[in-house]
Amino acid sequence: MSGAVRPVVRIQADDFDTASEIAALTTGRSDIGAVVTFSGLCRDEAGRLAALELEHYPGMAEAEIGRIAAEAAERWPLQGVTVIHRYGRIKPGDNIVLVVTASTHRQAAFEAASFLMDYLKSRAPFWKKEHGVDGSEGGWVDAKEADDEAAARWRR
């Protein structure tokens, strides 16, 4: 079944509704026994961050995330995968990313979701710039070493 899974990948400025995305993936499906979701939110970084600005290359980001979502569907027996990543100016508390994985059993759904998030945190083609509450504009944020280490565990 995993070869038949067509991941849904969207890069968008607009917010998303997690419950609607889960329903879109699961409605009418009796073969799904587990759904794992991860919602990433913008932090305020101890009160100093007014917004996070995310940029991407249209087309390239969708293709690259689609490639890694397809790899997840090949590695684990999934019935569905949805990845939504926002771009633009995002305020603390707002959604940034949503990963939804569906499988017959929970372990595959958990592992696939973790794999996807480790990839998104370390290698997805997005650039982040911080905007401070004091009006300052920070530099572009580098990937953290811990994110790279987490992604390394999935290398074949």
Image (cartoon, helix red, strand yellow):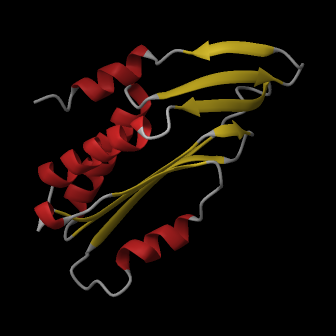
Q: Residue at x 39, y 24 (%)?
A: 147
Provide residue 54's location: percent of width, then percent of height: 61, 32
Provide residue 151's location: percent of width, then percent of height: 29, 28
The part of the image, by quadrant, that contains residue 59 is top left
Tally of numbered tags: 0
Q: Is residue 129 left or right of residue 136?
A: left
Provide residue 83's location: percent of width, then percent of height: 41, 52
Q: Is residue 102 left or right of residue 74?
A: right
Q: Is residue 19 left or right of residue 93?
A: left
- The extreme front residue here reads 59
Q: Is residue 6 above or below residue 122?
A: below
Q: Is residue 116 above or below residue 31?
A: above
- The extreme top residue here reads 139
The part of the image, by quadrant, that contains residue 30 is bottom left
Position of the C terminus, as image quadrant, is top left
Q: Residue at x 34, y 34 (%)?
A: 119
Q: Is residue 70 above or below residue 24?
A: above
Q: Residue at x 40, y 35 (%)?
A: 60
The part of the image, by quadrant, that contains residue 80 is bottom left
Provide residue 38's location: percent of width, then percent of height: 45, 51
Q: Residue at x 21, y 80 (%)?
A: 31
Position of the N terminus, as image quadrant, is bottom left
Q: Is residue 73 left or right of residue 82?
A: left
